[in-house]
Image: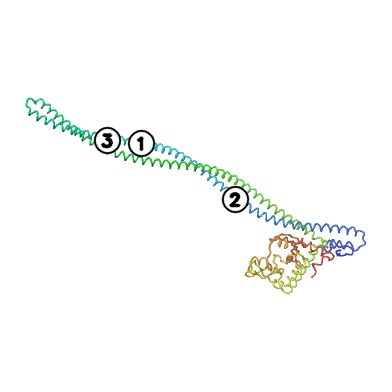
């Protein structure tokens, strides 16, 4: 059974309860018939208050865990909202660029289709030109053949004319011979002489005419020969042109065919770009909706953070009210007793220091050179840090799963800390932040709460950046009616309670307070 304090008389017990000196676990030595029902009532009240305290602490622990997760979720929601807003802006930009790209591709497709239609028309004209060149080539071939025949006939005429000229010359000679013979014949030959004379004249005229014909025929033959040469050259050029036009027409036809294929591909690309554009437009709308939802989520997470913070405040207020009623015989009462005993020891140390001439209310914090994070000296810290550290380590060593025990002044200054938090600085910021925590000013929310507390035990719960849930118990430190600061004890309360409850049976509440 747990030890109980016995008070003489029921009234004395109730008076001590009102003053906070007795616990609901204590009983009265009395013959008053009301003692039994009052004791039963106090026992039932104690059981309920123990359950309320345990529940409130568990609620505070869960609220701290929820607040840490909510804060993390809020940070993530803020980051998500910022990213969503940025993504939404980018989505609008992408949608605009996509629309411009779609319009550009559609415009290029339309222009290409128009150019392709013009190329088809040009291909038709080229094919017509090829046919015309082919017909001209055929006609030039026929003309060359005609010129060749004309040349042959002109040569034949020339030969005939020369033959006629030779005949005319021979006829003229015969006429001359006939005239000579007629002259010799006298009157008998006069008639024949006339005929011979006329034949001679006729032969001269034929010879002259034949000469003209031969001359003209020679000119014609020269012209025909030139025409034949030129027609052959033109025919050869036309054949070459026909071949070139044919090759160009074939190449142009392949080009038009390839461009038609490209045109089909451009149509497919235009369709795909249109689909991508529609997808980008839909995606931009979806991203804008996500951004709106992210903003709403961020607001709700902020509201949830405020609500969780309110729950923490309410549970801390409830615990502060419950602390005014000492239940006795519980692990929490052991912590209360141990923390109170540490407070009394710290007050005694501060009084001795003041009696020795130290200014224990000194607030002129002098930063220690090259200390990062900043650490400070005051007028009294180096004189009391060894004795104070022994007191702090003494309590911490008796608390299962304790994390720290610390004394801070009204501004959150800790003259010293537990031994494993007071290591020499190394210059490594991460190491010194975690292991050089003595002589520092703490202005976090938990420290400020402990400083502002004017009542009994204040129970605050929070999550460290390591993910560990810490319950911080603190009570004010006053020196001759003047507020000096607070003593604090941090621990894993759930694990402490599991470890302390079996050991607490039969030991009372003074175990943690023993030196």
Instruction: Please report the residue visible at 60 percent of the width from the left and 50 percent of the height from the top.
Output: 87
Q: Nearer the viewer, mark 1 or mark 3?
A: 3
Left or right side of 57 for 249: left
- Locate the N terminus and report the quarter of the image it occupies: bottom right
Dot 2 falls on a residue whose secondary structure is helix
Left or right side of 100 for 146: left
User: Mark 1 and mark 3: span between their CA atoms?
Assistant: 21 Å
Residue located beneath label 3 in the image: 152
State the image coordinates of residue 281 (x, y, percent, origin top left). 58, 45
Left or right side of 279 for 189: left
User: Mark 1 and mark 2: span between their CA atoms?
Assistant: 73 Å
- Locate the C terminus and report the quarter of the image it occupies: bottom right
Dot 3 falls on a residue whose secondary structure is helix
Task: Tell me which numbered mark, 1 or 2, is placed earlier along the sequence.
Answer: 2
State the image coordinates of residue 354 (x, y, percent, origin top left). 73, 72
Q: Nearer the viewer, residue 421 or 488?
A: 421
- Crowding at dot 1, Cα within 10 Å, few <14 / some 14-19 / many 20+, comes out as some
Residue located beneath label 1 in the image: 138
Dot 1 falls on a residue whose secondary structure is helix
- Crowding at dot 3, Cα within 10 Å, few <14 / some 14-19 / many 20+, comes out as some
Q: Which mark is residue 479?
A: none
Q: Name the image colouring.
A: rainbow
Image quarter of residue 377 = bottom right
- Crowding at dot 2, Cα within 10 Å, few <14 / some 14-19 / many 20+, comes out as some
Residue located beneath label 2 in the image: 87
User: Mark 3 and mark 2: span between their CA atoms?
Assistant: 93 Å
């Amino acid at each position: 059974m747990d030890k109980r304090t016995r008070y003489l008389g029921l009234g004395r017990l109730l008076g001590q309860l009102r003053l906070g000196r007795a616990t609901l676990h204590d009983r009265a030595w009395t013959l008053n018939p009301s003692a039994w029902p009052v004791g039963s009532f106090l026992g039932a009240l104690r059981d309920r208050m123990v359950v309320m305290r345990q529940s409130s602490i568990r609620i505070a622990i869960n609220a701290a865990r929820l607040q840490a997760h909510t804060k993390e979720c809020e940070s993530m929601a803020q980051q998500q909202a910022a990213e969503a807003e940025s993504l939404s802006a980018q989505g609008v930009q992408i949608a605009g660029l996509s629309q411009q790209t779609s319009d550009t591709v559609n415009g290029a497709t339309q222009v290409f289709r128009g150019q392709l239609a013009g190329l088809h028309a040009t291909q038709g004209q080229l094919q017509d030109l090829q046919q015309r060149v082919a017909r001209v080539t055929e006609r030039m071939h026929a003309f060359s053949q005609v010129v060749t025949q004309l040349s042959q006939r002109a040569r034949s005429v020339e030969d005939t004319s020369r033959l006629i000229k030779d005949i005319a010359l021979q006829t003229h000679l015969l006429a001359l011979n006939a005239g000579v013979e007629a002259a010799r014949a006298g009157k008998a030959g006069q008639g024949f002489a006339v005929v011979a004379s006329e034949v001679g004249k006729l032969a001269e005229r034929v010879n002259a005419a034949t000469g003209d014909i031969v001359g003209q025929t020679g000119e014609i033959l020269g012209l025909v020969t030139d025409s034949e040469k030129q027609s052959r050259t033109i025919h050869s050029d036309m054949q070459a042109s026909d071949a070139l036009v044919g090759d160009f027409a074939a190449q142009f036809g392949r080009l038009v065919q390839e461009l038609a294929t490209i045109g089909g591909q451009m149509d497919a690309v235009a369709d795909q770009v249109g689909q991508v554009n529609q997808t980008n437009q839909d995606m931009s709308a979806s991203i804008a909706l996500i951004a709106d939802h992210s903003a709403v989520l961020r607001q709700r997470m902020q509201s949830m953070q405020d609500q969780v913070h309110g729950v923490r405040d309410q549970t801390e207020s409830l615990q502060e009210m419950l602390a005014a009623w000492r239940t006795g015989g519980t692990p929490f009462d052991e912590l209360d007793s141990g923390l109170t005993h540490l407070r009394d020891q710290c007050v005694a140390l501060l009084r001795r220091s003041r009696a020795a001439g130290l200014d224990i209310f000194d607030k002129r914090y002098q930063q220690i050179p090259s200390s990062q994070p900043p650490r400070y000296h005051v007028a009294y810290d180096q004189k009391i840090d060894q004795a104070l550290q022994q007191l702090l380590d003494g309590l911490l060593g008796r608390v299962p799963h304790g994390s720290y025990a610390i004394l801070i002044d009204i501004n959150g200054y800790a003259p010293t800390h537990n031994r494993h938090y007071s290591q020499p600085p190394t210059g490594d910021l991460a190491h010194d932040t975690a292991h050089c925590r003595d002589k520092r000013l703490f202005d976090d929310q938990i420290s400020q709460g402990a400083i502002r507390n004017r009542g009994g035990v204040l129970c605050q719960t929070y999550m460290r950046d390591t993910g560990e849930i810490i319950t911080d118990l603190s009570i004010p430190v006053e020196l001759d009616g003047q507020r000096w600061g607070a003593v604090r004890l941090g621990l894993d309360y759930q694990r402490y309670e599991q470890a302390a409850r079996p050991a607490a049976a039969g030991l009372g509440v003074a175990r943690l307070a023993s030196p």
